[in-house]
Amino acid sequence: MINVRTARMLADYKRWANQRLFDSLAALPPGEVNKERVSVFKNMIGTLNHLYVVDCIWQAHLEGRGHGFKTSHDLLHPELAELRQAQKDIDHWYCDWSERQTDASLDKPVEFSFVSGESGVMSAGAILMHVVNHASYHRGWVIQMYFEIPVMPPVTDLPVYLRETDPASFQPIRAPAAAPTYVAQFSSATNVLPDRYR
C-alpha cells in the first residue's frame, strides 16, 4: 500500500506542517488561540488538542499497547507552548518510527480498538496515512479560524513542503494555456479570498 520512502516523506511533511502552524499561532494576538469560535472543539487550542490526542491513540496502536483514552476530545494541553512541545515530540516519534520501517512492516496488519470499543485492523502504513490525513484535515479547521481574526494563515500544502525540503526534485505543475471554462461560474465566490487561494 505504501513504501518506506513515502512513509518517511509523509511523517516529515506532518512534522513540518505542524511546526509551521505552531510558529504562526505563537505570533497571533494574545487570546486568539483560546477564543471561542463556531467549531466542534470550541477554539484553535481545542482543535489542536484533538489532533494531538488522535496522534497519541494511533501511536499506542502502532506500539501494540493500550492508550487509556475514552474520547478523542480531551484537552490535555490548554496552553499553546505546552501543546506545541507535546506535538513536536510526537511528530518526531512518527518520523523516527517511519525511519525504522520496511516495506514489509508497513504492510503488516495492526489490530486495535477504537475509543468506542469497536475493534479494527489496518496495515501500519494505512495507519500512518490516516494520521497524516487527519492532521491535515484539522489543520484546515484551524486555518479557517484565521480568517475570523482576520489574519493570513501559514501555507502548509504538500507542494510547498516538497519545494522547500527537496527543491532539486520538485517539478512544479505548469499552468494551463487557457483557464478552464467553469472558472467564471465561481469567480464571485472566490473574490473574497486572497490571491493565493484563487
Image (cartoon, helix red, strand yellow):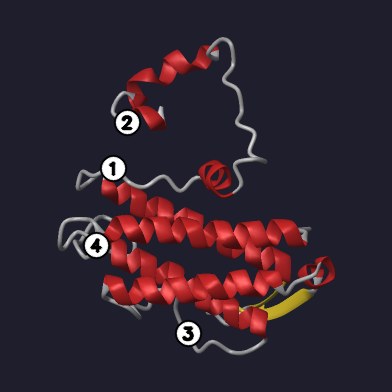
Give the residue type at disc 3.
Answer: Phe
Callout 2: few (<14), some (14-19), or many (20+) C-alpha neighbours within 10 Å?
A: few
Amino acid residing under circle 2: Pro
* Quarter holding residue 20: bottom left
x, y percentage for residue 92? 54, 72
The mark nearer the N terminus, 1 or 4, is 4
Q: Nearer the viewer, mark 1 or mark 3?
A: 1
Identity, as a three-letter code, of the amino acid under mark 4: Val
Report whether 16 appears left or right of 189: right
Mark 3 against mark 4, which lies toward the viewer? 4
Q: Mark 1 and mark 4: span between their CA atoms?
A: 14 Å
- The answer to which of marks 1 and 3 sits earlier in the sequence is 3
Find residue 31 and name its label. Answer: none
Q: Which residue is mark 1?
A: 152
Task: State the mark number for residue 69.
Answer: 3
Which labelled disc corresponds to residue 194?
2
Q: Which residue is mark 4?
A: 33
Q: Residue at x 32, y 31 (%)?
A: 193
Label 3 secondary element: loop
Q: Position of residue 124 (x, y in %)?
A: 72, 71
Say which of marks 1 and 4 sits in front. Answer: 1
Which quadrant of the figure has residue 133?
A: bottom right
> How far is mark 1 from mark 3, CA to CA?
34 Å
Residue 89 drawn at (x, y percent): 47, 76
Q: CA distance from mark 3 to mark 2?
A: 40 Å
Q: Quadrant of the C terminus?
A: top left
SS class, disc 1: loop
Residue 120 vertical position relative to residue 148 in the rendered view, above or below: below
Disc 2, SS: loop
Of the numbered discs 1 and 2, the one sitting upstream in the chain is 1
